[in-house]
Image (cartoon, coloured by chain):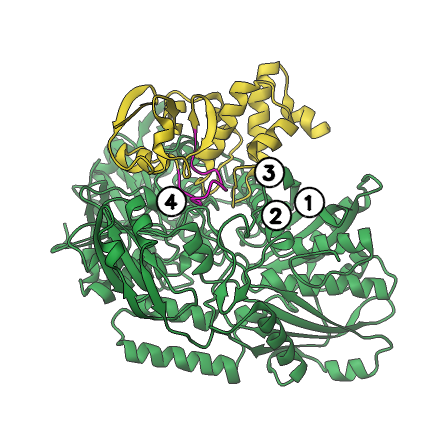
Chain colours: A green, B yellow
Amino acid sequence: MSNQTLSRRHFLKTSGLIGGGVVVAVALPGCAFQGPHPIEVADSGFVPNAFLQITPDNNVIFYCPSDEMGQGIRTGLATIVGEELDVDPATMLVKAAGSHEDYNNPEFGVQGTGGSNAVRVFYEPLRQVGADTRALLLNAASLELGIPSDQLRTDRGFVIVGDNRYPYGDFVETASTLEMPVASPLKAPSDFQYIGADAPRIDALAKATGTASFGIDADLPGMVYAVVVRPPVAGSKALKYDDSAARVAPGVQAIVPVSSGIAVIAEGYWQANQAAKKLTVVWEENALSAVTSQQVRRDLKTALDADDDTESTHEGDPDKAFAAADMILETDYYAPFLAHAPMEPLNATLHITEDGAELWTGVQFVGAAQGVLERLTGLPRGDIKIHNQFLGGGFGRRATLSHIVEVAEIAMSIDKPVQLLWSREDDLRHGFYRPAAMMKIKATTDEEGRVTAWQARRSGANITAQTMKNALPGVLPSMPTSLLNGLVGVMDYVFDNWAVDGSSVEGLHETYSLPSYRVSHASVDHGLPTTFWRSVGHSYTSFAVESMMDELAEARQIDPVALRLKNLEGKPRMQNVVAQAGKLMADMSVPETHHLGFAAHSSFGTDVAQIAEVSVTNGNIRVHKVTCVVDCGLAVNPDIVRAQLEGAVMFALTATLYGQIDLDGGAVVQSNFHNYPILRMNESPAVDVVIINSDTPPTGIGEPGVPPLAPAVANAVYRATGQRLRDLPLQLT
Amino acid sequence: MITFSLNGDSVSFTGDPNTPLLWVIRDEFKLKGSKFGCGAGLCGACTMHLDGSAIKTCVLPVAAAADKAVTTIEGLGNPEALHPLQSAWVEHNVPQCGYCQSGQIMAAAALIAEKPGASGDDIDQAMSGNICRCGCYPRIKAAILSVAGSALGYDATAVEARS
């Protein structure tokens, strides 16, 4: 199997796959693969380099290139490929794809899931895969039945001739001898049966019965368990450690230093967990060791007040417009560090043998995970198999490789399969965080509320260089470490001095049509690791921008929705979203003690407006209901779109009311859900979602529901109390 | 040796009696449906039934289960024979990442067993010990209400929406 080669961009192959049948792989643009075809042989079955497999008994298996972390991508992409293949996605078996270039995210150039892009970037290519495969089956049916293919039609996995229905599976043998059609015509959206219709999630049954398999559920014969004792301050190294008590604790097999700390390996997780508490370690101090949250806030403010930041982008001449203004608002907004806290703590199970390595985990960056194992183990890439499982939450946290690097170092020290498991304390204290951000917005409008000048500045740590530091060893597995470090150093230097990391300032101006603006940035990095957190820079920039829009409306005594509409000329999609949401808001009748707040924000190609219904009692902010209006282009599965908005509201409300990672002596203070609270059912609002009807290609939906929530709530709190809260989380004085 | 009933079968455990029940069930008896979320009884991902009551097993020493009946998600129902709550979970498209859902369903099942016609307030109270980071709360509540409503003979979801 492993010696078969691929020589064409579009190929067709029969094989001894379990179940047999046709396997179709269509390399996506820019990632055509040449060379040996590493079909993976795992005890769970074969994981071929292919999107579709049709068995002779007419089972359709779809190998999903994107990682399922709750966003519904397995259902979404199965719907897209099933539409053109003419197979009901509910009848497909959907599996996580193995690790292979053919599954690369077309925009990332590496296999991975993030940036709310999966439906958008796979929409056309997977429709083409479905259409070409259907055309192939029709050609085969035509040959076998002796009927011209234009007289055949298909229906839900069957070829139809008159009253006769032939399962696709009848034709896979013949299909395997034919050339794969290319560029087969796609359906007109008006002919869609599955795209655009509500349908059950493909994974709902497994997840309602405890049978869905997550990384933590991997269980190999002879497997041992590892926990890692990590430094209280990120990046600090162990100067010395005493493991005499831990070493003799029940079940302990080994104690080994790894690059992130000291690993304790035992027969059972609980034994490893208990033994780790007996370890005493002296950690070095580093630059982060003296840092407190108060200092971070102070340093970020000082950096903005110093006024020597780097320009990101500008339009027109805001200074001239400010000089002519009769009213200028200039205000600081602040957002703290945040942890992702996915419900499934990070874990990874690795088995290294003479023949290769097999990894069971949940990761948003399969390609880089494979690369980092290649780098660390020295094994050929084709001998490293990744069994990516359902992810028990991602939110960006699983786009980092910390758990993969750790498990590799541990597994290389012991001749057994090993499962690494982080505790919740590990998760909150040793994470990669949404960076803290100070934003200063200076703005003015004409008397009608049209913004005439806008200056938006942000200070804080950058995400891209930090994330690259973590990811590059996996993305570029062959590059020597010294060169990698040099590359990351250059990136840091560039972002500190010359250019602005787009992730740091995204959302500071894009939602509106502003005739003159300037966006700039001051990099301030205290050394706490940072990375993408659901909606990334938008998660804080929207708070500043949308609070300011309400502040401008008040200064001009204009309705906040009307003011926004005046600044959306040339942005018809958002203009419509805001107008629709504004109408809904105008028609809402709420109890006297409830107040409404509005916000809108564009991110990941999608426009969202939200109306928060809020009351304040004894200083406690309660959000009763959130109404969302969203234009995400064509909603492939509207019910999943609604679910993503509902979930985004809850995720963002946690950050709005509670979310805060504090530093004391460089160490993260929060440790578990008692001091890093997550919104619970009794605090959760009702959520209404209105999806704008659209047949334009789909845009992102996993993240865009997050940004507008915090400012919508803050704007409602202002109406309720007269207090303008400019710091997150929102706390009344 | 600690003996208890696990989903109707008598089982024994000879290891450390302080081991939390969760790890005994997952690692010794290989039932992986119950999840580890916090190790401190704060999130409910590990919820099982002990003699019919919902309990957080990441902080419950296995010794506390001696001679009692433990029910896990695997014992509540399975894909071929679903508990009514599991059917409701599927009908309402409840799960997102799905990691917390076993615990959510076990907490809900204990509530419904005790109060078949549970109200929205009952549900809020009984379910506030279970965190869902994906924020599936509106659907979890709707799914439980639909089961509670059938016990009462009406559509409780609609009633709740009007209240």
Specify few, some or many for label 3: CA neighbours under 10 Å numbering under 14, 14-19, or 20 or more: many
- Asked whether the residues under marks 4 and 1 belong to the same chain, the reply is yes
Q: Which residues are magenta?
A: B35-48
Q: Please name the residue that numbered disc 1 is placed on.
A: A626
Type of residue at label 4?
Phe
Report, in whole angstroms, how far the alpha carbon at label 4 lies from the one at label 1.
Answer: 29 Å
Where disc 1 sits, the SS reads: strand
Q: Please name the residue that numbered disc 3 is placed on.
A: A681
First in sequence: mark 1 vs mark 2: 1
Report, in whole angstroms, how far the alpha carbon at label 1 lies from the one at label 2.
Answer: 8 Å
Task: State which quadrant residue A488 falls in.
Answer: bottom left
First in sequence: mark 4 vs mark 1: 4
**Cβ–Cβ below 8 Å for labels 1 and 2?**
yes
Q: Please name the residue that numbered disc 4 is placed on.
A: A390
Of badges 1 and 3, the one in the foreground is 3
- Asked whether the residues under marks 3 and 2 belong to the same chain, the reply is yes
Type of residue at label 1?
Val
